[in-house]
């Protein structure tokens, strides 16, 4: 079948198996080019392993320190005449590359919030790995059915207390406009967002893994967060999502108590603003990222997800000197280059200047578009998108 991108708003409805495979190969080659990570993890569970930071974490662990990896995700398999999701194809490509390199890699497809998937992961760890020494928590979902109560929670993307008006961009059309978002109407919206995107499920995973005896002595676990610049605070850090991120970060001492007798530790890593399926959905953020990319590329300090995760693993979690600098709230900061004063000053200046007419000149909106389509396997020069491709790709450990 010939697969072309079909876009609806911030979602691409199709994905390309050869393009996603190229994306995975490019990330693997980057990690290999940086050399092995000394004292890196050897047996890793990645929860939310099929796209974005989770996929990059899995690639970094496997090809940076020869780790055996188990990935958990919720993706749509491919079927004849119907492409699978990008995450499905990413995982198929990753497993193929891992097997070729002689690395253990197996995957579980299902609702990671559920007790059943947690049990499946525990059984697989017991059977094949015994224990894991790193647990990466990188789930991104708009909904969660609570495994204990059965209540379905849906997150909302809204400011709290006051309406928010600022610039945004339709990154497909390149049109800059103002957008106004009304605040939440009740505390239930905030509570639901925390239930979906906060730290409770991360804690549930660690509790279940520990109770099953599958966490190694000295185990580490890391979850991902974002802060961003003040101009995005009303819709992000001070909005409903920010409350969920606060909850995630406040879960760290709770998990540390759980891991104390295993000499284990948990961290939240605050990562850089990047083009992901999640960030594309947040008003204001695409315009900010396109300006940020322009500034950081000019300064030679731009990073994508794989560069971020390789730096997190090599220079922070598994640094050779064993030292790990945390911020005043105990967080790892790999958004440090993004938040440099000189970078933020230039972005703020460009933000004030940005219009539809000058967008192509003062921003990296083209780079933003390319990265968006890259997420779904498109816009890779190595791939002929006019040619027939086999859409029915299986994940070896799931269907093979």
Image (spheres, grey):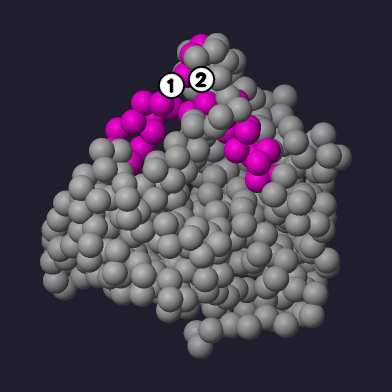
**Residue at horizontal 29%, vertical 64%?**
350
Q: Which residues are magenta?
A: 1-28
**Residue at horizontal 27%, vertical 58%?**
284
For residue 171, which quarter of the picture?
Answer: top left
Query: Residue 293: image x %, image y %?
Result: 44, 57
The residue tagged 1 is 4
Dot 1: what SS?
Answer: loop
Residue 131 as seen in the image, left or right of residue 82? right
Q: Are marks 2 and 1 in contact (CB under 8 Å)?
A: yes
Residue 45 as seen in the image, left or right of residue 278? right
Residue 368: within the magenta? no
The residue tagged 2 is 385
Q: Is residue 359 above or below residue 4?
A: below
State which quarter of the image contains the C terminus. top right
**Residue at horizontal 77%, vertical 39%?**
98
The reply to whether residue 122 is visible in this rendering is no
The reply to whether residue 86 is visible in this rendering is yes
Are there few (<14), some (14-19), or many (20+) residues within 10 Å of tag 2? some
For residue 174, which quarter of the picture?
Answer: top left
Work out whether residue 145 or residue 271 is closer to the camera in this orientation and state it. Answer: 271
Of all residues shown, which one is farthest toward the bottom? Answer: 328
Query: Residue 167: image x %, image y %?
Result: 20, 58
Residue 14: within the magenta? yes
Work out whether residue 20 or residue 251 is closer to the camera in this orientation and state it. Answer: 20
Query: Residue 74: image x %, image y %?
Result: 52, 41
Q: Is residue 78 above or below residue 136?
A: above
Query: Residue 207: image x %, image y %?
Result: 61, 66
Q: Nearer the viewer, mark 2 or mark 1?
A: 2
Are there few (<14), some (14-19), or many (20+) residues within 10 Å of tag 1? some
């Amino acid at each position: 079948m010939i697969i072309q991108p079909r876009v609806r708003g911030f979602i691409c409805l199709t994905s390309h198996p050869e393009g996603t495979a190229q994306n995975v190969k490019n990330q693997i080659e980057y990690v290999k080019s940086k050399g092995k990570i000394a004292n890196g993890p050897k047996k890793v569970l990645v929860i939310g392993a099929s796209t974005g930071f989770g996929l990059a974490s899995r690639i970094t662990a496997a090809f940076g320190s020869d780790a055996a990896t188990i990935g958990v995700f919720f993706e749509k398999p491919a079927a004849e005449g119907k492409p699978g999701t990008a995450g499905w194809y990413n995982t198929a490509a990753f497993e193929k590359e891992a097997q070729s390199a002689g690395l253990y890699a197996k995957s579980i497809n299902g609702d990671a919030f559920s007790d059943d998937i947690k049990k499946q992961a525990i059984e697989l760890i017991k059977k094949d790995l015994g224990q894991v020494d790193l647990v990466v928590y990188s789930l991104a979902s708009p909904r969660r059915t609570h495994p204990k109560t059965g209540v379905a929670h849906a997150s909302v993307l809204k400011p709290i207390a006051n309406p928010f008006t600022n610039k945004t961009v339709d990154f497909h059309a390149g049109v800059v406009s103002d957008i106004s978002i009304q605040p939440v109407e009740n505390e239930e919206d905030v509570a639901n967002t925390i239930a979906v995107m906060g730290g409770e499920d991360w804690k549930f995973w660690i509790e279940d893994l520990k109770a099953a005896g599958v966490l190694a002595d000295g185990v580490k676990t890391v979850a991902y967060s974002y802060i961003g610049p003040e101009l995005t605070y009303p819709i992000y850090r001070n909005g409903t999502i920010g409350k969920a991120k606060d909850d995630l970060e406040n879960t760290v001492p709770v998990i540390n108590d759980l891991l104390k007798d295993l000499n284990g530790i948990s961290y939240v890593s605050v990562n850089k603003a990047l083009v992901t399926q999640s960030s594309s959905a947040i008003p204001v953020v695409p315009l900010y990222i396109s300006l940020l990319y322009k500034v950081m590329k000019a300064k030679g300090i731009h990073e994508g997800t794989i560069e971020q995760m390789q730096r997190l693993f090599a220079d922070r979690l598994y640094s050779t000197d064993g030292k790990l600098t945390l911020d005043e709230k105990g967080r790892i900061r790999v958004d440090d280059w993004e938040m440099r004063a000189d970078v933020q000053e230039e972005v703020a200046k460009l933000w004030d200047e940005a219009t539809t007419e000058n967008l192509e000149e003062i921003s990296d909106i083209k780079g933003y578009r390319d990265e968006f389509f890259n997420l779904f396997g498109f816009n890779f020069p190595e791939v002929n998108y006019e040619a027939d491709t086999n859409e029915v790709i299986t994940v070896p450990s799931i269907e093979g």
